[in-house]
Image (tube, rainbow, N blue to C red):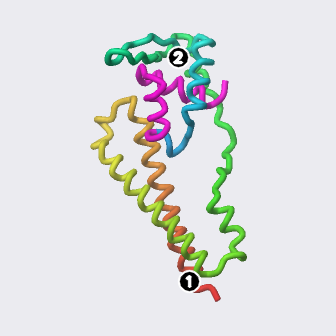
Amino acid sequence: MNILGYAILGLIDKQNITGYDLTKIFNDSVADFWSANQSQIYPELKKLVQAGFIQYETVIQGKLLEKKLYSITGKGKEELKKWLLEDEPQLSQSKDIFKMRVYFAEHLSKEQLLIKFKARQEKCQNLLQRYRTKINEYQDLEHISPENFGDFILLKGAIKQLEAQISWLDESINYITDYK
């Protein structure tokens, strides 16, 4: 099974959910570290049902709208647990278009490079503000539910990474400004 399948299993294990709501989660809650679109999610749901890892019941919403509400099976819980306990793969380098473009900075003027760095800095600061707002939902460690603990520690890590990224961007902007 691919990683998306395991991600879907984990999300369904947290709560019974529709495919539409899964898509919303991939666009919001887990979007910062994993992405999937509707055209990937629905075929994966079908595979998980066929494998016996999840099941669904059809529910009627309103007068006509039928939705499939997915839940994890015992077999699915076992498969998810087995995957969670696997050794972690080696650290991978993420693909970063911004960094690839900066690598070829000799083709940009100083002003063009500054524009790129300042735009990236603004995006990072906006995202950092969003994360800090979200982390405030967790008042203290004692009151974080087990279902939200992973989100909490990932948010803390994302905040640290963004702070480091912003520091690097600030330093780089100074280098660019002072360069020839």
Identity of the residue drawn at 68% across and 38% down = 89
Magenta residue span: 1-29
**Residue 52: which quarter of the image?**
top right
Marked residue nearer the N-terminal end (1 or 2): 2
Relative depth, front residue between 174 and 146: 174
Identity of the residue drawn at 58% across and 80% down = 111
Residue 80: image x %, image y %? 56, 22
Local secondary structure at mark 2: helix
Reply above or below: 137 against 17: below
In magenta stretch: residue 4: yes
Q: Label 1: which residue?
A: 177
In magenta stretch: residue 12: yes
Q: Label 2: which residue?
A: 77
**Residue 178: which quarter of the image?**
bottom right
Q: Is residue 16 shown left or right of residue 142?
A: right
Mark 2: which amino acid? Answer: Lys
Identity of the residue drawn at 47% across and 60% down = 124
Say which of marks 1 and 2 sits in front.
Answer: 1
Local secondary structure at mark 1: helix
Please give the label number shown on residue 60.
none
